[in-house]
């Protein structure tokens, strides 16, 4: 496989859970360093990288709402969790030699820039990594939907969803040992079969705008680089 990227601009979605490592809660410093190394491997070959990071390692709005908390309040807390993760990721990326900007969908001027599309695109053109925090800034929308939305806005050529699983299976591989791995699938099949790879709003938005998605395991060293250079990794979701 060549070292030449087939994409110029990508949006990387990292789940909050991926940043926990093995510790079950919070942010693992070792995992942050590992993620930074993976991102550097594609930044160094000239790829423009934007990132949306989840907050599930700190707080999950949808889980809190299930035990009686107001959904809007719970989701706002979840958005703040993504800001914590974004600042941690920014710090480790900059220590690794990548200029990074955090843009937040909720105003918090002391710690991040406001989300301004033209400014974000200018940062990318100048070789800076841009981290979009606080989701879409609205309750009831997940960071998956935020990732697809931001991916569309910046004209990313692909959305890479980095998770703890190898890709999409026809059933939960943790529960069903005979679950079959799916290498290629359409948006419509994901929706019809209710495959919980991303929430349905995110899949629908990607389908409406024809944004290709690749779901892959972040924990495998070199997978991001492989995807960017055209390798067969994870599950590809397209029209």
Image (cartoon, grey):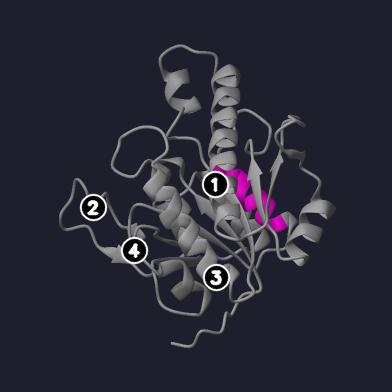
Distance, label 1 to label 2, CA atoms, is 30 Å
Query: Pointer 1 and pointer 2: residues touching (CB < 8 Å)?
Result: no
The stretch in magenta equals 143-152
State yes or no: residue 186 in magenta: no
- Marks 4 and 1, Cα distance to the nearest angstrom? 19 Å
Q: Does residue 155 appear in this view?
A: yes
Q: From this viewpoint, which residue is outermost toward the right?
A: 118
Please tell me the numbered disc located at residue 224. none
Give the residue pinned by disc 3.
42
The residue under label 2 is 173
Q: Are the residues tagged 3 and 4 within 8 Å (C-beta)?
A: no
Label 1, secondary structure: give it.
helix
Q: Can you identify the residue that label 4 sits on?
A: 220
Position of residue 149 measured from the top left corner of the image (x, y, whole percent): 67, 49
Q: Earlier in the sequence, mark 1 or mark 3?
A: 3
Per the image, label 3 sits on a secondary structure element best described as: helix
């Amino acid at each position: 496989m060549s070292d030449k990227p087939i994409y110029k601009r990508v949006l990387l979605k990292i789940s909050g859970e991926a940043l926990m490592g093995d510790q079950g809660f919070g942010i693992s410093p070792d995992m942050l360093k590992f993620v930074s190394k993976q991102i550097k491997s594609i930044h160094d070959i000239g790829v423009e990288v934007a990132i949306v990071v989840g907050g599930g390692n700190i707080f999950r709005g949808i889980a809190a709402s299930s035990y009686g908390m107001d959904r809007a309040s719970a989701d706002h807390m979840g958005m703040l969790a993504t800001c914590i993760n974004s600042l941690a990721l920014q710090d480790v990326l900059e220590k690794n030699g990548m200029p990074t900007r955090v843009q937040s969908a909720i105003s918090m001027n002391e710690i991040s820039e406001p989300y301004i599309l033209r400014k974000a695109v200018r940062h990318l053109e100048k070789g800076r990594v841009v981290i979009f925090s606080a989701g879409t800034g609205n309750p009831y929308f997940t960071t998956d939907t935020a990732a697809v939305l931001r991916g569309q806005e910046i004209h990313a050529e692909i959305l890479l969803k980095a998770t703890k699983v190898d890709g999409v299976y026809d059933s939960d591989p943790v529960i069903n040992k005979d679950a079959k791995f799916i290498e290629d699938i359409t948006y419509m099949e994901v929706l019809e079969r209710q495959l919980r790879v991303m929430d349905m709003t995110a899949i629908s938005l990607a389908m409406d705008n024809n944004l290709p998605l690749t779901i892959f395991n972040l924990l495998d060293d070199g997978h991001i680089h492989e995807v960017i250079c055209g390798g067969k990794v994870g599950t590809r979701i397209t029209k």
